[in-house]
Amino acid sequence: MTPTWTLEALNDFEDYIDWYLQNANEVIAGGFIEAVEKALDSIKDNNSIARMVDEIPELREYVVQQFPFLISYWIKDCTEIVITSFLHQKKKK
């Protein structure tokens, strides 16, 4: 299953890429993108790898290694992984 992104989650991810490009450098931004790609590969390989969210049992949260971000996703009809949010851990609601 290849993950699909909600528009809001994808926009948030792109905003953070822009933030790293403006406030750090291209090397760090590239490392950020690579870490997210690795996280998505892990989710694709084993979609139950992430912890379940207590309030919403169908939702899972994956912690991105090396960067303080959470990828929230759910598995739609056992056939599709949908990335529902991409959040900095300090902004988690």
Image: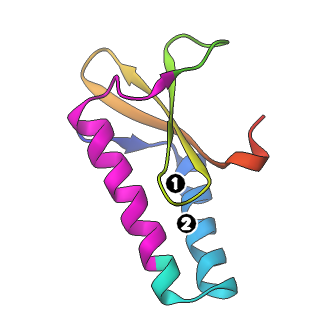
**Relative side of 22 to 74, left or right:** right
Residue 59 screen position, x and y as percent: 52, 21
Q: Main secondary structure of the magenta part?
A: helix
- Up-down relation of residue 42 to residue 79 (above or below): below
Q: How is the image coloured?
A: rainbow
Viewer-closest of 28 and 4: 28
Residue occupying image coordinates x 49% and y 14%? 58
Q: Position of residue 48 (x, y in %)?
A: 34, 22
Q: Are marks 2 and 1 in contact (CB under 8 Å)?
A: yes
Residue 49 shows which numbered tag? none
Crowdedness near tag 1: few (<14), some (14–19) or many (≥20) residues, C-alpha within 10 Å:
some
Label 2 CA crowd tier, 10 Å (few <14, some 14–19, many 20+): some
- Quadrant assignment, res 79: top left
Q: How far across and down, in percent of the image, does residue 22 sit? A: 66, 86
Q: Which amino acid type corresponds to the residue marked 2 in the rendered image?
A: Glu
Q: Quadrant of the C terminus?
A: top right
The residue to which callout 1 is attached is: 10
Residue occupying the far front of the picture: 66
> In what element is the residue under mark 1?
helix
Decide: is 79 above or below 22.
Answer: above
User: Looking at the figure, which quarter contains the N terminus?
Assistant: top left
Q: Secondary structure at mark 2?
A: helix
User: What is the x, y in percent for residue 71?
Assistant: 52, 42
Q: Residue at x 62, y 57 (%)?
A: 12
Residue stretch in magenta: 30-51
What whole-number distance in Å separates the C-alpha atoms at marks 2 and 1? 6 Å
Query: In this rendering, would 91 be left or right of 21?
Result: right
- Reading the image, the residue beneath label 2 is 14
- For the point 52% across and 54% down, the residue is 10
